[in-house]
Image (tube, grey):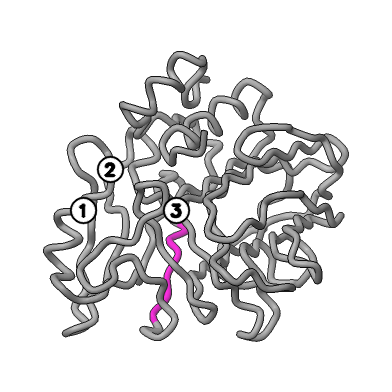
């Protein structure tokens, strides 16, 4: 199976020609969310957006190159703010769309008629009171998993805040800042990663969650092999740690989340995070 970009020349070219729609799966993709077309054969929309003037909503798709359709987004929002009500799952399997019906809890993507960006790409921002949620995913999905997450901690970085939660019980399957404001990953065994909490800086955190055979990398570099644990996935919450109060919500931003229901090979792992790095200009 071929996933993403496989050589340095392709990665270099991706700086000029973004690698859109290059991630291909043969049924092992569990959930895929991006502010671009992540998967070649996906035919649905990218996001559902509410504009702040009349609270009308519209589905926003992709342009001819697979990028977010920014023209359609700005046409819908006009000079108003735009908030994400639904982030559609592009995996093609069981639909795990992330949603937030509460207008006061929806992350923002347009501010007064201007698209919010990081490294030149659209991004959604969570103000410390927002989250996107998918509960009741059916049968819990057991390990191993391969996860690629593009995020930014917005200044000031706070301690003990949930970023991504994949289980209804705290300390079970999640990414958060610990009591020292360091990024902590815990799928049954807590592991911290240095230099992943620089404020207002876009990162890709990529990992294979597979007990003692786990893998962890930041922006695709300096991969390590810690034991992350092997707890299963039973929901998806961005912006908060499930099982805690709203005071646990993070002030953060997010662009992409990809989850596979297996441990990718070393080559596949490299190809996916090269693809993501190339698109989001992560170097």
Horizontally, residue 59 falls left or right of residue 25, namely left
Q: x, y percentage for residue 71?
A: 15, 54
Question: Considering only vertical position in the picture, is 260 above or below 50?
Answer: above
Q: Which residue is mark 1?
A: 70
Q: CA distance from mark 2 to mark 3?
A: 12 Å
Q: Which residue is mark 3?
A: 255
Q: x, y percentage for residue 264?
A: 65, 30
Residue 163 image-quadrant placement:
bottom right
Element assignment for label 3: strand
Residue 269 inside the magenta-drawn segment = no
Tally of numbered tags: 3
Assign the magenta stretch its main secondary structure.
loop
Element assignment for label 2: loop
Q: Earlier in the sequence, mark 2 or mark 3?
A: 2
Q: Which residues are magenta?
A: 96-101
Q: Residues within 10 Å of mark 3 (few under 14, many from 20)?
A: many
Q: x, y percentage for residue 258?
A: 53, 45
Q: Circles 2 and 1: CB distance less than 8 Å?
A: yes
What is the number of the mark on residue 278?
A: none
Q: x, y percentage for residue 147?
A: 62, 44
Q: Circles 2 and 3: CB distance less than 8 Å?
A: no
Q: Which residue is mark 2?
A: 67
Q: CA distance from mark 2 to mark 1?
A: 8 Å
Q: Residues within 10 Å of mark 1 (few under 14, many from 20)?
A: some
Horizontally, residue 4 falls left or right of residue 77, namely right
Q: Residue at x 66, y 57 (%)?
A: 197
Q: Earlier in the sequence, mark 3 or mark 1?
A: 1
Residue 78 image-quadrant placement:
bottom left
């Amino acid at each position: 199976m071929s996933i993403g970009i496989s050589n340095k020349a392709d990665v270099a070219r991706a700086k000029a020609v973004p690698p859109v729609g290059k991630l291909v799966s043969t049924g092992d993709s569990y959930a895929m969310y991006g502010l671009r077309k992540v998967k070649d054969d996906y035919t649905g929309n990218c996001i559902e957006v509410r504009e702040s003037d009349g609270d009308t909503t519209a589905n926003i798709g992709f342009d001819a190159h697979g990028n977010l359709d920014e023209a359609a987004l700005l046409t819908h929002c006009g000079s108003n703010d735009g908030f994400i009500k639904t982030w559609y799952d592009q995996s093609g399997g069981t639909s795990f769309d992330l949603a937030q019906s509460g207008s006061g809890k929806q992350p923002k993507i347009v501010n007064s008629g201007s698209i919010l960006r990081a490294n030149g790409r659209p991004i959604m921002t969570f103000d410390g009171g927002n989250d996107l949620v998918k509960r009741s995913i059916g049968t819990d999905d057991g390990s191993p998993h391969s996860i690629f997450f593009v995020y930014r901690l917005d200044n000031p970085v706070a301690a003990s805040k949930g970023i991504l939660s994949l289980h209804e019980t705290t300390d079970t399957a999640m990414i958060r800042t610990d009591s020292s404001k360091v990024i902590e990953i815990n799928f049954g065994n807590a592991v911290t990663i240095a230099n992943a909490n620089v404020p207002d800086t876009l990162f890709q955190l990529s990992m294979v969650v597979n007990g003692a055979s786990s893998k962890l990398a930041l922006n695709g570099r300096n991969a390590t092999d810690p034991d992350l644990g092997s707890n299963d996935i039973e929901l998806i919450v961005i912006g908060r740690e499930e099982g805690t109060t709203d005071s646990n919500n993070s002030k953060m931003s997010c662009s992409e989340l990809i989850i596979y229901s297996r441990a990718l090979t070393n080559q596949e792992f490299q190809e996916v995070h090269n693809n993501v790095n190339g698109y989001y200009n992560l170097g």
